[in-house]
Image: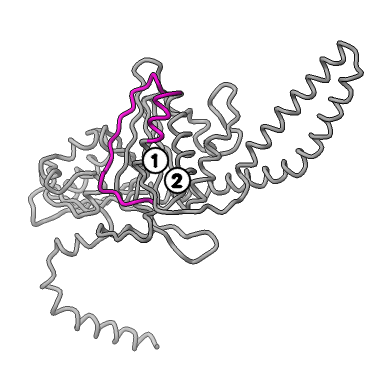
Amino acid sequence: MSSTLARRAAAGIARALRPSAPALEASAILGALPVPVVVLDADNRFRFANPPAELFFQLSVASLAQHTLGDLIPTDSRVFSLVEQVRATDAPVSDHDLVLESPRLHRQGVSVRGAPLPELSGGVVLTLQDGSTAQKLDRQLTFRGAARGASAMAEMLAHEVKNPLSGIRGAAQLLESSASEGDRELCTLIQDEADRIRNLVERMDMFSERPVECAPVNIHEVLDHVRRVAERGFAAHINIHEDYDPSLPPVWGNRDLLIQVLLNLVKNAAEAAPPVGGEIHLMTAYHHGVRIAVPGSSERVDLPLQISVRDNGGGIPDEVRASLFDPFVSTKRGGQGLGLALVAKLVADHGALIECDSRPGRTVFRLSMPIAPAVPVSRPFPIDA
């Protein structure tokens, strides 16, 4: 089509649409947008919020109407200077890569755009684009790469190490029978070290590629099992709190592997929590999930079910956060650094996401899981990412 014809076609479409445009209510249009949108009055009170904004702030429209912006985020946030600049210049203003941190809110990489609303004295329209979704996907690709690296290492170790290791151990046993007292001690040392290396190789073998058999799983039954195991063992000195959404549908996963994942996360939380006043919070919720591609196909899966494990420990050091899920990375003295690498591998095998937010006094690991496919869902569809 020539450019002239294209312009004529566009003009025709515009003329056809123009008569129906006044019938559309602004609130309906804003409500249909996938981006959080709020309207603030001159006192920074919420006068409007669309459904994505409710999810962003984790509050309903009715609850938001009872709050000011300062109730939800610190008043020294750059958002407030943006809002004042919009009012002062009577022009749109944007800011990017903001951190919105408060007891009820933890958002990173947020882009905020403000524009004046002439119909409301001092009114400002804000759109908030949460960059954490993209960050989740980037981190998940990193975790999957780490899992694949661990899988390749497991296969190499199993093939190249276990067989000659058996020969070394057998030779040490033969030498032991005819060796002197001092040499027998060395033979025993060789056997013990061979056994230690074999055990490490067998642990690495857990990373090998195996298909995961999935079925509908009641995640609250899994969490209850994990809690009981923890309270009777490694977390006997820790207060474990539960905050569950009882209406959650079953997740699509492998029950035994999910127990393994959550036991590992709870054990890490128990070790990180202070010996006195240590707390672990187990939480479930339904959130707008992201939609990710299933490896090896064009299919995409929704991940709206969120399972969280939170502790009140000292937090994860900055220098290891980027490689937290890599094999042999550990913050514990004597740790082998395979626990979280295995967690990342098992989560990736489920086609799920795992993320970690940490600061002193608050570390949260979040799993975003798919719904069992046979379960009908009446909640809003998640946003494509």
The residue at which mark 1 appears reads as 222
Task: Specify how the rendered protein is coloured.
Answer: one colour
Eyeballing the image, is 11 above or below 202?
below
* Residue 313 visible in the snapshot: yes
Residue under the image location 41 percent in, 37 percent down: 365
The quadrant where residue 334 appears: top right
- Report the amino acid beneath label 1: Val
The image shows residue 185 at horizontal and vertical percentages of: 82, 14
- Is 237 contained in the magenta span? yes
Determine whether label 2 and label 1 are within 8 Å by CB.
Answer: yes
Give the mark, 2 or 1, whose residue is nearer the N terminus. 1
Q: Quadrant of the C terminus?
A: bottom left
Give yes or no for residue 240 being in the magenta stretch. yes
**Residue at left 45%, top 43%?**
258
Residue 62 in percent (x, y) is at 11, 47
Q: Is residue 166 above or below residue 303?
A: above
At 18% across and 36% down in the image, what residue appears? 70
Q: Nearer the viewer, residue 225 or 296?
A: 225
Q: Residues within 10 Å of mark 1 (few under 14, many from 20)?
A: some
Quarter holding residue 43: top left
What amino acid is at disc 2?
Arg
Mark number for residue 255?
2
Q: Secondary structure at mark 2?
A: helix
Residue 100 locus on image (x, y percent): 30, 39
Q: What is the span of residues highlighted in magenta in the rendered image?
A: 225-251
